[in-house]
Amino acid sequence: MTQNRLRLLAAFLPALMLGTAVYAQDIAAEEPLVGDPERGKVVYQRIGICVDCHGWAGDGRSGRNPRSPDAGASLRETTMFVEDLVEVVRCGRPGTQMPHFEGAAYRDDRCYGLTMEDFGDDEIGPIHGKTFREQDAYDVVAYLQQSMIGLGDPN
């Protein structure tokens, strides 16, 4: 493993676990954002095009675009909390096909404590999706909570 990969792994994993708590403290001083599931459905299907990888049912299989780079994670089975899900929408998942949707992600260390300089030339860095407003991330998560998370297999 290259030194860059070891450094990235050492930085990414603890930041993933602890970064959400720091982010939650930052927004706790402000009025918390509440998502609109109806708007979230539009963002999921048409703006972020989440449906391409996660499918219409959010299971990573049903109705997924066969030309998408990879099947997305099953959102129906996730056990992540709201702030964790919002962070994944904002920051993506470096090293995977999950893009980040925050325009300023990785310009500073707001995402998992990493910047673009932390990713070496031989590593898959964060993929940029369409830029969302912060409210859009909460709307998508509200839609997932209402229509997918914990609902079992689609029918």
Image: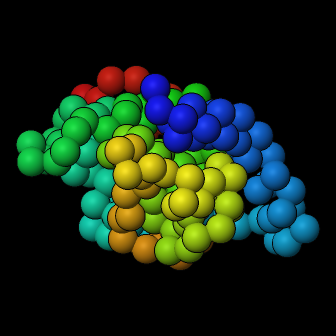
Q: Is residue 104 left or right of residue 93?
A: right
Residue at 66%, 40% in the rendered image: 11
Residue at 62 percent of width and 54 percent of height = 114
In the displayed structure, would residue 52 be above or below residue 15? Answer: below
Counting from the top left corner in percent of width and height, residue 134 is at 59, 71
Q: Looking at the image, is 51 positioned above or below residue 73?
A: below
Pinpoint residue 70: horizontal percent, then vertical percent: 22, 39
**Could you tell me if residue 146 is visible in this image?**
no
Task: Report the side of 74 relative to 114 (left or right).
Answer: left
113 or 31: nearer the eye?
113
Quadrant of the snapshot with the C terminus: top left
Task: List the single residue furthest toward the right.
Answer: 29
* Residue 66 in view, yes or no: yes
Please, which colouring scheme is shown? Answer: rainbow
**35 horizontally vs 125: left or right:** right
- For the point 57% across and 40% down, which residue is it? 8
| Residue 111 position by quadrant | bottom right
Q: Observer-nearest residue: 102 or 40?
A: 102
* Residue 143 horizontal side relative to residue 129, left or right: right
Residue at x 22%, y 51% (from the top left corner): 52
Give whichever of 58, 5 is nearer the camera: 5
Count of picture labels: 0
Q: Locate residue 108, reporting x and y percent.
A: 65, 68
Q: Residue furthest front?
A: 3
Give residue 81's position: percent from left, percent from top: 66, 39
